[in-house]
Amino acid sequence: MPGELRSGHRAPALAVALVCAVGVWATWFLFVASPTGRLLDAAAYDGAAYGRTRLWQVAEPVLEVISVPFIGGVLVATMLLALLRRRALLALQVAVLMGGANLTVQVLKYWVLDRPDLGLGDTLRNSLPSGHTAAAASVSAALVLVVPARLRPAAALLGAGYTTATGISTLVGGWHRPSDVVAAVLVVLGWAGVATAMGARTALAPAAVAPHRTAATVGLLTAAGAFATVLAGVALARTAAGLEAGLDSTADLLTAYGGGAAGVGATACLAFAVLLAMRAAADPRRR
C-alpha cells in the first residue's frame, strides 16, 4: 500500500526569498552606490554600443513582445491553466509571483532605490531593476510553477534561455546595465520563493514526477551558470585592473560588455536551477 503523504518543504523557498532580497540590495550597493562598481557597470554599458546596429535587429523583436497586455495575458492564461488542473491555490501562487515581482521592480526603481551622485559625471537616473527582464523572468517562472511536474525541466530550460535573451537584449539596446538585469532576476526569484512556500503544505497527491530528469536539468543549468560565472569573473577582473589607466580601447569595452552579458546568463541559469529544485522540494511526497 502506498504510504501517507508528507508535506513539502517550505523552508528552502523562504530562504531563497530572503537571500534574493539581500542580493538585490547588495547588487545596488556594489554597482550603483560604489564608485568602482559603477565604473565597471558603465564600461559594460559603453561596450554594448559596438555592433549595436546589427544586433538590435535581433534584440528589438525580443523586447517589443513585452508589454502590460502581454504580462496580463500570460497571467490570465497561467491562472486558467492552474484552475483547469483544479489547483485554485496554484492560481493564487501565480498571481502573487507575477504581480509581486512586476510591481516590486517598479517600486524599487522609482521610489526606493536611487542613483547617488558620486562625482563620476554619469547619468543620475536610476534604472535598477530592469522591468523588461523582470517581466520575461516572471512569465517564465510562472510557467515552471503551473505546468505538470514532468514538464518543469523543459519549462526551466526555456525560461533560463528566454530570460537571458531578454536581459542581453536590454544591454544591446542601451536600455539597461548588467546590474539592472541581475537585480530584476533576483526580484523574480525572491517572489517565486514566496509563491512556492504558499503551496508547500498542501496535501494534494503528488503528480507524476521524473526526479532524474529534474536533477539532470538542475545540474545542467548549474553547470552552465557556473561556467558563465567564471567568464564573467575573469572579464570583471580584467576590467577592474584597467580602471586606473582608463578603459578607452575597444578591447577593454568589449571585455566589460562580454563579462556583463556572461553575468546575465549566469544569473538566469542559476536562478532557474534554484527555482526548479525549490519547486521539487515543495511538492508533497509519499513517506
Image (cartoon, rainbow, N blue to C red):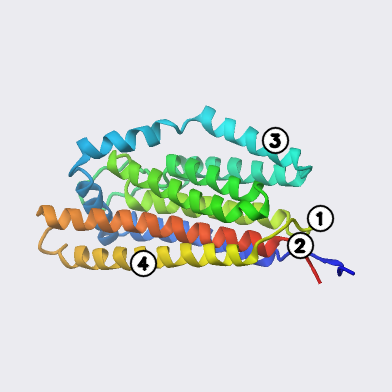
Badge 1 vs badge 2, beta-carbon distance below 8 Å: yes
Which of the pair 256/103 is nearer the observer? 256
**Residue 204's mark?**
1
**Which residue has dot 4 on it?**
227
Give residue 217's mark.
none
Q: In the rendered image, which residue does mark 2 sit on?
A: 284
SS at circle 4: helix
> Which mark is first along the chain, 2 or 1?
1
Q: CA distance from mark 3 to mark 2?
A: 22 Å
The picture places residue 16, in percent across and down from the top left corner, at 58, 62
Q: CA distance from mark 2 to mark 4?
A: 33 Å
Q: Are marks 3 and 2 in contact (CB under 8 Å)?
A: no
Q: Which tag, 4 or 1, sits closer to the chain's start? A: 1
Q: Residue at x 72, y 60 (%)?
A: 283
Secondary structure, mark 3, is: helix
- What residue type is disc 2 on? Pro
Q: Nearer the viewer, residue 69 or 239?
A: 69
Q: Which of the two labelled residues, at mark 3 and mark 1, occupies the earlier sequence position?
A: 3
Residue 27 lies left or right of residue 286; in this view the side is left
**Horizontal arrangement in the rendering, residue 60 relative to residue 129 (left or right):** left
Residue at left 83%, top 58%? 203
Label 1 crowd (10 A; few <14 / some 14-19 / many >=20):
some
Place of residue 237 in the rendered image (x, y in percent of width and height, measured from the top left): 24, 68
The quadrant in which residue 263 appears is: bottom left
Amino acid carrying label 1: it is Leu
